[in-house]
Amino acid sequence: MQSTAWLSLGANIGDPQAQLAEAILALDMHPRVSVTARSSVIITKPWGKTDQPDFANMAIAVSTDLKPLELLDVCLGVELAMGRIRKEVWGPRLIDIDIIAYERVEIVSDRLTLPHKFAHDRSFVLDPLREIAPDVADWIVTLKR
């Protein structure tokens, strides 16, 4: 059975626009993931750790038969294949791929929280998400109040 998930992508070192495109292509080439919608790219100031370059951010929708944790593993695999090294929380990155929501599933685990635990508070996640799934963005905001 196919499910829809919404992902947030961001990058702020290297060539962010090219890295976003590469990540989308890698996800879409996965045999069990199909990109069905993509927002425009927005440029935003860093969140959390502010002494770094601005971010290019966007949202995509994917159709998949993967379960949430399996999709997380695919996203982390794309990040790793693209050269992401996790040095510091909220630090600079070549690529960041977060699952923002998966259908209307709510999960809290050591590996994954859905909807994303900070999404309701981050305009760089909500604004692109509103372009492709305004109802999902509204659900996240309502749920987290």
Image: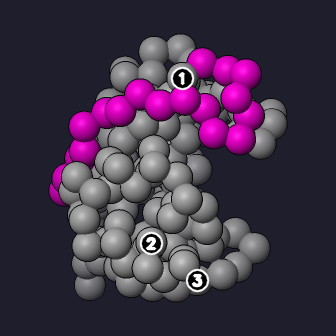
The residue beneath circle 2 is 141
Discs 3, 1 touching: Cβ within 8 Å? no
Q: Which disc, if any, is residue 5?
A: none
Task: Measuring from the top left, give residue 75's x and y in whole percent.
Answer: 50, 52
Residue farthest top in this picture: 14
Which residue sits at x=34%, y=72%?
138
How far apart, in angstroms, are the residues tagged by discs 3 and 1?
30 Å
Q: Amino acid at mark 1?
A: Asp
Indicate the secondary structure of the residue bearing disc 2. helix
Discs 3, 2 touching: Cβ within 8 Å? no
Q: Amino acid at mark 2?
A: Val
Which contiguous range is marked in magenta?
A: 28-53
The residue beneath circle 3 is 107
Q: Which callout, 3 or 2, points to the residue nearer the camera? A: 2
Mark positioned earlier in the residue sequence (1 or 2): 1
How far apart, in angstroms, are the residues tagged by discs 3 and 2?
16 Å
